[in-house]
Image (spheres, helix red, strand yellow):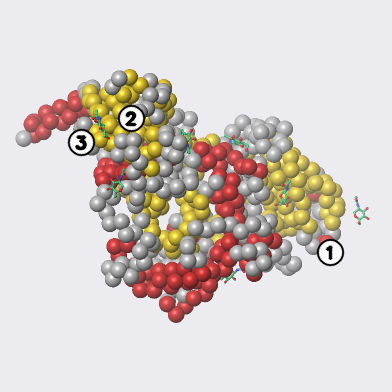
């Protein structure tokens, strides 16, 4: 037995490297089919693993307002000097001595200067694992101080690697304690770019001018130049990468981060708006404080800047630790959602609409999609969701906004009493192995059509080499290809599918290197993963109607689907998931004679990944002329994704 098995293993290994050739002919119907969703390929954003703070949000200072701590999974004392260091003869102390700058920020940093101080003294901040300091960006440095000081204050970037100053801006300060809190802000461009990410931000002043005394600091912020120049906006390189995905919707603000790790730490929309000094922040779900600098209006501005349809998720009475709000106590949270909707969509004459207008957005936003909660199938949420939570939010929102499309965060099949109103969209999350992902190609073919489907989160998170969930550190060619097969299954069921978004848009390489994401980042670099390119290939080549495609072989391991857009361009997608190492493809598109473009995505090996400084994905675009027999080309590789644009 043993030797027979050995032989089989050896044969399998041999077959794995032996080139095999296949062929397929695809006959594309020119008749239109079902309309596709106008928001098919979208994005999910929540602050997870520093996707927002220390990521997409353009703030460089970590702990700018002395909020939060990493102690005890973020549940410890809610103030800290973490990430700040003295840079001279002064000592740094947390203080809550009145008057405060705002009640939202109860703790500030008191800088006590030695009585014999001479020369420059001050303090510095580490940033989020460093900072991107470049002459290509303008930076906006700002802070508030209380105390008596007359003289110059210097704000400067330093390189920790070369121990030299990279650039600075000087503030003229002349104030006394009686002036209370005074704000300062200045923009500047550094003289030198940092050689790497190990850069810090320093504030220094003349110690002898304060000898034996103190100056208090609050909200010390440095924003890099933002995407589209939007105020309090998005980090340029990450935002550009996100924009290139050509997403059509933004599901916000989560994700588990909406829910909160425990009472009362749910995401509260009203505490993420207004001047940043009025935002208290909160312990986030993912082990670090959220500044809420990237708040509700910043997310809406993001939608405007990238032409994204917002899918607004609202908190519905379930905390992640399983605490559930009773039916009798739920109304205030429903009122809170109605207030949020008035804030976003109401006329500027309404109570909350006027608040929005006062913050610079006189035009109401449009909210067409609202999701009640997030993953209410977890943490014991199902019984109360079925009994009263879903229906109470649904009824209240529909009463005021009858045309709003409502999304259930659980599968429609849980509503065994059929109480779920027809056309409610079900948000189904799929975190699967690569093989299970690919196996879902026909998963929706025979699904009931009563409740449309949003795949609000997906990712292939393990494979044959990483055998339990989340073991995959980075998407591989194989895992991304499995996601592409999954996309094909959704495109073929366009009459049912509303949209799809990856479960992890952005993660920090420093915070979470060991878990898949579309994009990973450090302060000075970003990595676009295989999954990123797969989603980009599919989202940038998508039509408004499905078209029938007939193949002369059965589906699997080669899969296909096609759409056509309003100007008659066809997008024929073909994915090889572990089949022949070379496939001759012939595509017939009756009536078409134009030169087509073939776009392919592959990599040298099924386990190839994109990592920092090592991009293994290969994206090609070639022109294909028509011949008597149609459009013919060869797809090389057992794992490859392709789109023929005709
Ligand atoms: C392709 O399909 C069309 C119908 O859509 C059919 O008329 C035609 O004969 C088919 N061509 C081939 C080569 O199978
Ligand atoms: C349109 O949807 C119906 C119902 O799901 C399906 O049977 C049909 O194959 C679809 N047509 C195309 C062209 O996708
Ligand atoms: C700066 O470099 C020193 C010495 O290499 C190191 O101990 C320190 O942690 C670094 N600080 C930052 C913020 O990178
Ligand atoms: C710089 O930031 C401060 C504080 O957020 C803000 O008031 C000011 O308008 C900003 N300046 C510029 C030029 O963007
Ligand atoms: C600081 O302000 C005070 C009061 O306005 C003024 O008398 C004094 O000249 C100022 N000092 C400097 C150095 O500007
Ligand atoms: C935000 O709204 C909640 C009610 O949902 C309320 O408890 C809280 O005090 C509000 N926060 C502020 C700063 O007004
Ligand atoms: C750093 O910031 C600049 C300006 O925002 C941006 O262009 C650049 O892509 C960022 N990243 C790197 C790798 O320096
Ligand atoms: C159809 O797709 C082609 C190729 O991507 C594009 O140039 C054209 O603008 C699209 N038409 C519409 C209506 O989207």
Tell me the element at label 2.
loop
Q: Quadrant of the C terminus?
A: top left
| Residue 408 % position (x, y) | 39, 62
**What distance separates the C-alpha of mark 1 from that of mark 2?**
79 Å
Estimate how packed mark 3 is, as few (under 14), some (14 to 19) or many (20 or more) residues with alpha carbons within 10 Å.
few
Q: What is the spatial separation of the Cα atoms under label 3 and label 1, in whole angstroms?
A: 81 Å
Whether residue 9 can be seen here: yes
- Secondary structure of the residue carrying tag 3 is loop
Considering depth in this image, is 114 or 517 the residue closer to the camera? 517
Q: Is mark 1 within 8 Å of ligand 5?
A: no
Residue 22 versus residue 62 in the image, above or below: above
- Residue at image location 52% in from the left, 74% down from the top: 332
Note whether ligand 1 is within 8 Å of mark 3: no
Q: Position of residue 493 (x, y in %)?
A: 32, 47
The residue that mark 1 highlights is 178
Kindly identify which residue carries mark 2.
Answer: 589
Residue at 47%, 63% in the rendered image = 403
Question: Earlier along the polypeptide chain: callout 3 or callout 1?
Answer: 1
In the image, 333 versus 118, the foreground residue is 333
Q: CA distance from mark 2 to mark 3?
A: 19 Å
- Please state, as top left, top right, bottom left or bottom right, where the N terminus lies in the image: top left
Whether residue 98 sits left or right of residue 78 in the image: it is: right
Q: Position of residue 53 (x, y in %)?
A: 56, 50
N-term mark: 1 or 2? 1
Q: Are marks 1 and 2 in contact (CB under 8 Å)?
A: no
Residue that appears at 67% across and 58% down: 362
Q: Which residue is mark 3?
A: 554
Q: Earlier in the sequence, mark 2 or mark 3?
A: 3
């Amino acid at each position: 037995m043993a030797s027979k098995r050995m032989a089989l293993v050896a044969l399998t290994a041999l077959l794995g490297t032996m080139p095999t050739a296949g062929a397929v002919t695809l006959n594309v119907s020119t008749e239109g089919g079902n309309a596709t969703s106008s928001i098919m390929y979208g994005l999910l954003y929540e602050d997870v693993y520093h996707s927002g703070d220390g990521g997409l949000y353009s703030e460089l200072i970590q702990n700018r307002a002395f909020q939060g701590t990493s102690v005890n999974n973020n549940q410890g004392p809610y103030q800290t000097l973490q990430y700040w260091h003295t840079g001279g003869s002064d000592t740094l102390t947390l203080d809550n001595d009145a008057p405060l700058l705002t009640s939202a920020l109860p703790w500030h940093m008191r800088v006590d200067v030695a009585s014999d101080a001479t020369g420059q003294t001050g303090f510095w901040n580490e940033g989020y694992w460093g900072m991107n300091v470049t002459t290509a960006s303008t930076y906006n440095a700002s802070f508030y101080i209380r105390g008596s000081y007359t003289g110059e204050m210097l704000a400067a970037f330093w390189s920790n690697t070369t121990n030299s100053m990279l650039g600075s801006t000087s503030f003229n300060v002349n104030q006394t304690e009686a002036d209370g809190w005074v704000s300062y802000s200045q923009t500047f461009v550094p003289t030198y770019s940092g050689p790497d990410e190990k850069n810090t931000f320093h504030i220094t002043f003349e110690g002898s001018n304060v000898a034996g005394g103190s100056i208090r600091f609050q909200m010390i912020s440095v924003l890099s130049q933002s995407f589209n120049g939007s105020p309090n906006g998005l980090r340029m390189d990450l935002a550009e990468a996100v924009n290139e995905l050509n997403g059509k919707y933004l599901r916000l603000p989560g994700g588990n981060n909406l829910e909160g790790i425990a009472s009362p730490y749910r995401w509260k929309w009203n505490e993420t708006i207004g001047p940043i000094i009025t935002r208290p922040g909160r312990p986030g779900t993912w082990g670090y404080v959220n500044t809420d600098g990237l708040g509700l209006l910043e997310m809406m501005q993001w939608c405007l800047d990238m032409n994204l349809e917002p899918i607004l998720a609202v908190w519905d009475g379930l905390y992640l630790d399983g605490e559930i709000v009773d039916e009798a106590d739920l109304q205030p949270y429903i009122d809170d959602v109605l207030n949020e909707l008035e804030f976003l969509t109401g006329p500027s004459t309404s109570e909350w609409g006027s608040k929005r207008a006062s913050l610079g957005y006189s035009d109401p936003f449009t909210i067409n999609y609202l999701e009640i909660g997030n993953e209410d199938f977890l943490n014991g949420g199902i019984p109360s969701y079925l009994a009263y939570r879903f229906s109470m939010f649904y009824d209240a929102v529909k009463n005021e906004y009858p045309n709003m499309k409502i999304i259930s965060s659980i599968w429609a099949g849980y509503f065994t009493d059929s109480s779920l109103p027809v056309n409610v969209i079900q948000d189904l999350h799929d975190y699967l192995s690569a093989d299970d992902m690919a196996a879902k190609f026909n998963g929706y073919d025979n699904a009931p059509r009563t409740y449309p489907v949003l795949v609000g989160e997906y990712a292939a998170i393990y494979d044959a080499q990483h055998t339990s969930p989340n073991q995959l550190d980075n998407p591989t060619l194989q895992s991304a290809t499995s996601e592409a097969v999954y996309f094909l299954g959704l495109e073929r069921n366009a009459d049912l599918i509303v949209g799809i978004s990856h479960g992890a848009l952005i993660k920090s390489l420093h915070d979470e290197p060991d878990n898949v994401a579309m994009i990973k980042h450090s302060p000075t670099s970003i990595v676009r993963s295989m999954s990123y390119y797969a989603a980009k290939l599919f989202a940038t080549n998508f039509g408004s109607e499905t078209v029938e495609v007939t193949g002369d072989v059965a589906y699997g391991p080669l899969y296909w689907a096609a759409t056509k857009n309003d100007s008659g361009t066809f997008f024929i997608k073909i994915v090889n998931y572990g089949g022949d190492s070379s496939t001759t493809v012939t595509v017939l598109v009756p009536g078409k004679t134009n030169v087509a473009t073939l776009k392919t995505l592959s990599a040298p090996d099924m386990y190839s990944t994109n990592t920092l400084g090592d991009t293994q994905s290969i994206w090609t675009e070639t022109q294909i002329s028509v011949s008597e027999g149609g459009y013919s080309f060869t797809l090389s590789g057992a794992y490859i994704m392709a789109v023929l644009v005709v």
